[in-house]
Image (cartoon, rainbow, N blue to C red):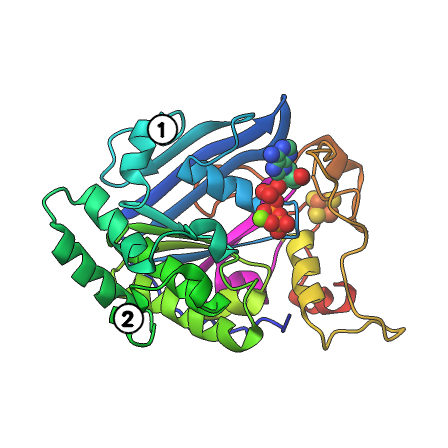
Amino acid sequence: MTAPTTGATAATTPPEAEEVLTVRGLSVAVNDVGLVQDVDLTIRRGERVGLIGESGSGKSLTALSIMGLLPEDITATGSVRLAGVEHDLIGADESRMSRVRGKDIAMVFQEPMTALNPTMKVGRQVAEPLLIHRTRLDRASAHAAAVDLLDQVGIPDPAAAAQAYPHQFSGGQRQRIVLAIALANDPALLVCDEPTTALDVTVQAKVLDLIVRGVEERDAAMLFITHDLAVVATACERVLVMYGGRVVEAGPVQDVFTRPRHRYTQGLIGASNLALVDENGRLSTIAGSVPGGGQFPAGCVFRTRCPQATQECAERPPWTSTGPDAGYACFHPTSPEEVVSHG
Ligand SMILES: Nc1ncnc2c1ncn2[C@@H]1O[C@H](COP(=O)(O)OP(=O)(O)OP(=O)(O)O)[C@@H](O)[C@H]1O
Ligand code: SF4
Ligand SMILES: [Mg+2]
C-alpha cells in the first residue's frame, strides 16, 4: 500500500445535488451481537465516497445491507433510502429488491467469478439485466447493447468476446465484464467492494479508471470500499472511516487525510505511510488487532488499542450520529503534526 496523496483529484459535488443514497441509523446484528452500529451515510448524485477501515470493521456488511444481500441469519435495522424507490430497502422482500438491484443499484465485488455464470456466454450475461429490467427491449437490441458495453469497458473485439465464456478471459477482463453488467442499466448507485484487490497490480489502475469513468459518464453515485487509501485519494471526494462497526470519522478526503480527528484514522493513515518509521526505525502500524465477532468495548470502540485512552473514553462514545458528516470526534484529538509521530 502506498501513502495517500493529500490532494484528492476528484471534483467536488455541488451540495445541492440530489441525495441518491440516504442511510440512517443502520445497525447489523447476528444473534443479538452488534456487528454494525448506527451508521449514517449520504451520497449525492455524481458523488464518489470511499469506505475504509481495517479488516473486520464492518465495511462489507454495510454494503451488503444497502443491497439487501445479507445472509439470512444476519438482521439489519435502520433505514436505507434510494432516490426514485418508494420503499425503504431495509426490510424489503426479495421480489422488491430484485427490481431495484441491477437497475437502480449495482455492485462490483472483489472476485469476478462469483458474479459470473461459468456456463453462460458473456454477451448473454451482459444483456440479461437489460432484458430483465427493460421489458420492451428485444433480444437483438439487448445483444447489440451488450457488445457496446463490452466495448466501453475495453474488451478487445467485443462482438467475438460476447460469444465466449468467462474462463476464456483474464481476471482483469472478467472484472471489466462484471463492470459492464453493473453499468448496463445506468444505475443511480454503484457499490464497489474491493473491486481491484484480487487483480494483478498491472491492471488494477486501469480497472479503477474504468469504474470511475463509467460512474462519471452516468453521473451516478458511488460507494467504494477499499484498504488502499491512495485509491480513495484518487477516486473519491468524501471518505468514511469505520472501526468496530461504527463510522468513527467522515468528511472530504482532503480534510480526513490531512487533518484526521480520530485517533483511529490517524493510526490508519500512519500505517499506510511506508515512509513513516518511529525512533527505532520500525514501520508505524496500529498496535493490536480488530476484535472479532462484535466484541468491542463500551465507550469508544477503539479504546483497547488507543494509547491516549482515558476513563472518559470508557464512559461514553465520543461521537454522535446526526447527519452525513456530523459529530464524529475523539475526546483527545491531536494536532496533525503529532499524528506523524505516533501513527
Ligand atoms: N455471516 C456472518 N456471521 C457472523 N459474523 C459475521 C458474518 N459476516 C461478517 N461477520 C463479522 O462482522 C464483522 C464485520 O465483517 P465485514 O465483513 O463487514 O468486515 P470488513 O470491514 O468488510 O472486513 P474486510 O476488510 O476483511 O473485508 C467481522 O467481525 C466479521 O467476523
Ligand atoms: S475517544 Fe479516547 S479511546 Fe477513542 S480514539 Fe479518542 S482518545 Fe482514543
Ligand atoms: Mg469486506
Asked if the magenta segment contains residue 237, the reply would be yes
Image quarter of residue 237: bottom left
Image quarter of residue 198: bottom right
Q: Residue at x 71, y 64 (%)?
A: 271
Q: Give the range drawn in magenta.
A: 235-261
- Residue marked by disc 2: 160
- Residue 312 relative to residue 269: left or right: right
Which quadrant is the C terminus positioned in? bottom right
Q: In which quarter of the image is ligand 1?
A: top right
Asked if the magenta segment contains residue 219, the reply would be no
Q: Residue at x 87, y 73 (%)?
A: 279
Closest to the observer: 232 or 55? 55
Residue 13 in the image: x percent, y percent? Answer: 32, 60
Residue 300 in the image: x percent, y percent? Answer: 69, 39
- Residue 243 relative to residue 226: left or right: right
Gap in angstroms between the C-alphas marked 1 and 2: 35 Å
* Nearest to N terminus: mark 1 or mark 2: 1
- Residue marked by disc 1: 94
Residue 224 in the image: x percent, y percent? Answer: 46, 56
Q: How many marks?
A: 2
The single residue placed furthest to the right in the displayed view is 280
